[in-house]
Amino acid sequence: MDTVRLGSLTVSRFILGSNPFSGFSHQGPKRDFEMERYYTAARIKEVLRAAEELGVTTLIARADRHVIRTLMEYWDEGGKLQWMAQTCPNVGPTLQTVKMAVGGGAKAVHIHGGVMDNCLARGDMSDPLAGIAAIREAGLPAGIAGHDPEVFRWAEREGPDIDYYLCSYYNSAHRDKSAEKSPDQEEWFLEADRRIMAETILGLSRPAIHYKVMAAGRNRPEEAFAFAAKAMRPTDALCVGVFPKEKPEMLAEDVRLFRQGWAREKGGR
């Protein structure tokens, strides 16, 4: 599989996401609970091993104790995927979860997208900047995520010392009052938001990881991966989580569709 560089780290262009592992469906509390019940540690490790077999080298997952414990079991059993950690505002302050990520074996760390959106809305970026400094002090590649394109415009203007962006195609919930959305908060997935983020990415100076490309299961896979492949630059990657309860071949199909879309776009360049 193709790879890209994020600072000193080389990752597969297709990165495995983990929201379903932690019960974040973005489809409502009932679906959240279904994912939590389904994703035992054994099933998570099955997906990680399947990703390895498909040529995926990298996982993006939260820096929480559930993820860290599961990854330690997986690595002890011979697992090879490398972990890019996301800070977790509902676990603790940014600096605390950076420390957890570093201690848990992360190969890169980025600031949670909701935190970035919320800090920007409040006009106080001291928290993410302190987190970025701590990641740098640990000697790891540092990044920021965001749902609001203004997050990345701020980063381009202010130039914090980071290696990569995680750009959500959908700004699906306002985070001006809280970095984390509540489980029953209404979300929206607008085509206009997807196109605005895709246009924003074209002007960014750092590699971007495209995420929420499936609109949390609302988009047809064929269309979603074709759009992503067209929107991605040679320096970019994408991140996709899977929930194979009703469709065991979901991950393999997603990798295949992305590879096909990327090959078409690459051939046309």
Image: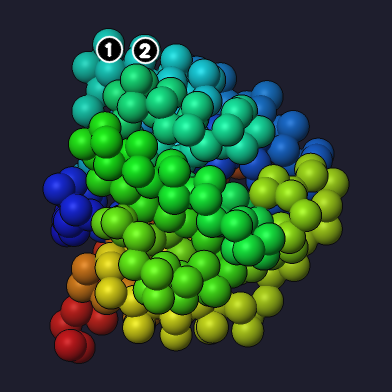
Q: Which mark is residue 225?
A: none
Of residues 118 and 39, the one nearer the viewer is 118
Does residue 22 appear left or right of residue 7 in this picture? Answer: right
Residue type, mark 2 in image: Glu
Q: Which residue is drawn at 58% across and 33% down?
A: 93
Q: Which residue is drawn at 79% across and 44% down?
A: 182
Residue 82 seen in the current view: no
Does residue 229 appear left or right of residue 173 in this picture? Answer: left
Q: How many marks?
A: 2
Of residues 224 and 163, the one nearer the viewer is 163
Q: Where is residue 104 in the image (x, y as percent from the top left)?
A: 36, 21
Q: Where 235 sits versus 139, above or below? A: below
Q: Where is residue 143 in the image (x, y as percent from the top left)?
A: 36, 52
Q: Where is residue 196 in the image (x, y as percent from the top left)?
A: 54, 83
Does residue 205 appear left or right of residue 268 in this picture? Answer: right
Q: Which residue is drawn at 18% across and 58% down?
A: 4
Q: Where is residue 220 in the image (x, y as percent from the top left)?
A: 56, 68
Colour mode? rainbow
Does residue 144 appear left or right of residue 192 in this picture? Answer: left
Q: Are marks 1 and 2 in contact (CB under 8 Å)?
A: yes
Q: Quadrant of the C terminus?
A: bottom left
Of residues 63 and 47, the one nearer the viewer is 63
Q: Residue at x 46, y 64 (%)?
A: 167
Residue 267 seen in the current view: yes
Kindly indicate the quadrant of the structure image that contains residue 247: top right
| SS at circle 2 | helix
Q: Where 183 sits versus 226, above or below? A: above
| SS at circle 1 | loop
Kindly indicate the quadrant of the structure image that contains residue 201: bottom left
Residue placed under numbered mark 2 in the picture: 73
Residue type, mark 1 in image: Glu
Residue placed under numbered mark 1 in the picture: 77
